[in-house]
């Protein structure tokens, strides 16, 4: 069970951020992540080794989507709950600037279609590869790349417009 403990230490924070984004609720996200790791405890190590991160994100996503189907609604990204999740800390001098930038980026990201939001978060918040994102979402790697490309292009256009308007 040492490998499960190591997986929990490495992936619990990122999974919690991901689940919070999917559920919109930090408490529900904790339940989803807990169930994800319970399923890992029951899984055969040989079946998940080599693709542990993708396996964890897939299980987490499926649990969150199942919950969504039961509740028949998915709340939007909850910035307050996501900010309360422990993450790597920046130097104190950068904290305010990073918080403002993150808030602006989250607001712009929230304007994208849900599928673009999800793949961009998996790529840049959770550092998953296109192949891992493909396994998690069930989309082809090509489609994942296209969604990331079009989403980033839209975000760059919004940034350019904001800079022109003096808002960035």
Image (tube, rainbow, N blue to C red):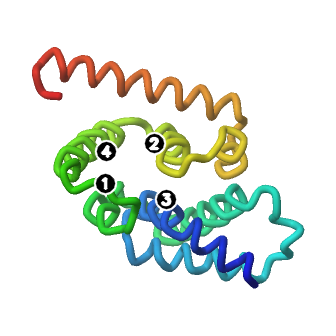
Q: Report the front residue among 159 and 127.
A: 127
Q: Which residue is outermost to the left?
A: 166
Q: Nearer the viewer, mark 2 or mark 1?
A: 1
Q: Which residue is mark 2?
A: 117
Crowding around mark 3 (Cα neighbors within 10 Å: few <14, some 14 to 19, many 20+) is many
- The secondary element bearing badge 4 is classed as helix
Separation of disc 2 and disc 4 at Cα? 10 Å
Against 96, residue 32 (above or below) is below
Looking at the picture, how far across and down is residue 139, in whole percent?
Answer: 68, 40
Q: Earlier in the sequence, mark 1 or mark 3?
A: 3
Q: Which residue is mark 4?
A: 106
Relative horizontal placement of residue 85, taking residue 94 as reference (left or right): right
Q: Residue at the spot x=60%, y=65% of the render?
A: 60
Looking at the picture, how far across and down is residue 79, in whole percent?
Answer: 28, 57
Q: Nearer the viewer, mark 2 or mark 4?
A: 4
Separation of disc 4 and disc 3 at Cα? 13 Å
Separation of disc 2 and disc 1 at Cα? 24 Å
Q: Which mark is residue 90?
A: 1
Q: Which mark is residue 18?
A: 3
Relative horizontal placement of residue 154, taking residue 136 as reference (left or right): left
Q: Earlier in the sequence, mark 2 or mark 3?
A: 3
């Amino acid at each position: 069970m040492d490998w499960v403990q190591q997986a929990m230490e490495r992936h619990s924070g990122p999974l919690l951020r991901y689940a919070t984004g999917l559920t919109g609720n930090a408490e529900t996200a904790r339940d989803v992540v807990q169930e994800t790791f319970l399923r890992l405890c029951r899984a055969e190590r040989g079946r998940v080794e080599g693709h542990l991160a993708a396996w964890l994100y897939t299980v987490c996503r499926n649990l969150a989507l199942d919950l969504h189907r039961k509740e028949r609604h998915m709340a939007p990204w909850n910035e307050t709950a996501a900010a309360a999740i422990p993450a790597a800390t920046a130097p104190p001098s950068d904290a305010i600037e990073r918080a403002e930038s993150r808030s602006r980026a989250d607001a712009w990201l929230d304007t994208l279609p849900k599928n673009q939001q999800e793949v961009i978060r998996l790529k840049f918040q959770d550092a998953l590869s296109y192949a891992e994102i493909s396994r998690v979402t069930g989309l082809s790697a090509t489609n994942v790349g296209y969604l990331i490309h079009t989403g980033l292009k839209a975000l760059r256009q919004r940034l350019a417009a904001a800079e022109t308007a003096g808002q960035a």
